[in-house]
Amino acid sequence: NMPAYQYIGDSSDTDINGHGYQESWFLIDIDGTGLPTPEPTDFENPEIVSFTHDPTVVDVTSESAQVTMAINVTDNVGVISGANYRISRSNTNSDTWITGGPFTLSSGNAQDGIWTSVATIPTDTITGDYSVIITGQFEDAAGNYVCCRTSDTGNLEITKNNPQITQLGSSIL
């Protein structure tokens, strides 16, 4: 009577003399107690359910401003690391980008959580519409990941309220 067996892997390689060979490995049930059940392998990527930022307009006339980004990420096993962010204008180089991260889990859990990060917009930032983008990736323990998405909230508008200068009681523009 042949014992039960379970195929567990193989490889092909070349030995030190340059001869090719192929190996196969099997688990054999010698004592009749049954073969172990292999651990399931996770092939599911995490999923970004939503990505928002608040506020959508900031004024950096006299002081820097804070923008909070929040991402709802789900995964069947659990996310173990957060992505980074980039706030940038179209057709600009990396010298003008505002970057940071990583996002950290702030509520919920690794299977369904809200990951947040706060960006500081400096006073010397050029005004205009900026895209808020996830860079890098949210990764689970099996190495599956999800990457790169623009905020559902739309663009971030950075403004400067240039007050009128008053000289001797009259306004000068």
Image (cartoon, rainbow, N blue to C red):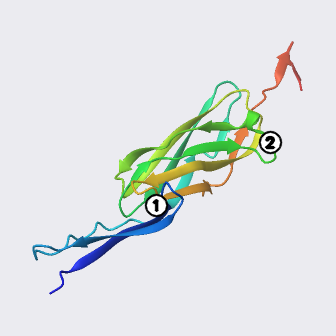
Question: On the image, numbered disc 2 is attached to which residue?
Answer: 92
Q: Nearer the viewer, residue 112 or 43?
A: 43
Q: Residue at x 19, y 73 (%)?
A: 35
Q: How far, Cα to Cα, is label 2 from label 1?
A: 30 Å
| Displayed quadrant of residue 39 | bottom left
Q: Residue at x 36, y 53 (%)?
A: 110
Q: Residue at x 27, y 68 (%)?
A: 38
* Quarter the C terminus occupies: top right
Label 2 sits on a secondary structure element that is loop
The relative height of residue 40 versus residue 113 in the rendered view (above or below) is: below
Q: Amino acid at mark 1?
A: Pro
Residue at the far top: name it. 168
Q: Nearer the viewer, residue 162 or 32?
A: 32
Q: Nearer the viewer, residue 24 or 77?
A: 24
Q: Position of residue 91 (x, y in %)?
A: 81, 46
Q: Residue at x 15, y 75 (%)?
A: 34
Q: Position of residue 157 (x, y in %)?
A: 70, 44
Q: Amino acid at mark 2?
A: Thr
Q: Position of residue 93 (x, y in %)?
A: 78, 39
Question: On the image, numbered disc 1 is attached to which residue?
Answer: 46
Neighbours of disc 2 within 10 Å: few (<14), some (14-19), many (20+): few
Label 1 sits on a secondary structure element that is loop
